[in-house]
Image: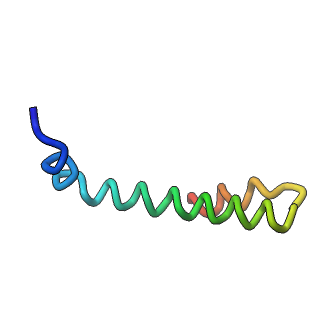
Amino acid sequence: MSSLPEAISKHKGKIRLSVRITVSALAAYAVNTWLQLPQGYWIAFTAIV
């Protein structure tokens, strides 16, 4: 069984990508909420892709 720092070190690239995608989706959601677009869910889909 590995420790948490070892696991983070081993999967550092995957964790960074996950954080970047999450931040971009949340930012897109915030923009959608701010602008109150009728079909704003497409903003989050586009940010994720």
- In the image, residue 2 above or below residue 26: above
Residue 29 sits in quarter: bottom right
Q: Which residue is at 81% across, 66% downward?
A: 34
- Residue 20 relative to residue 39: left or right: left
- Residue at x-position 74% and y-position 67%: 31
- Give the position of the C terminus as an image quadrant: bottom right
x, y percentage for residue 46? 65, 61
Number of marks drawn = 0
Look at the picture and state if 11 lies above or below 33: above
What residue occupies the far front of the structure in this picture? 4
Horizontal relation, residue 30 to residue 11: left or right: right
Quarter assignment of residue 32? bottom right
Query: Percent x, y for residue 44?
Result: 67, 57
User: What residue do we see at 13% from left, 49% from top?
Assistant: 6
Q: Which residue appears farthest toward the top when viewing the image?
A: 1
Q: Residue most toward the right?
A: 38
Q: Nearer the viewer, residue 35 or 39?
A: 35
- Write down the quadrant of residue 18 in the picture: bottom left
Q: Is residue 7 above or below residue 16?
A: above
Residue 40 vertical position relative to residue 3 in the rendered view, above or below: below
- List x then y, in percent, for residue 11: 23, 52
User: Is 10 situated left or right of 45 in this image?
Assistant: left
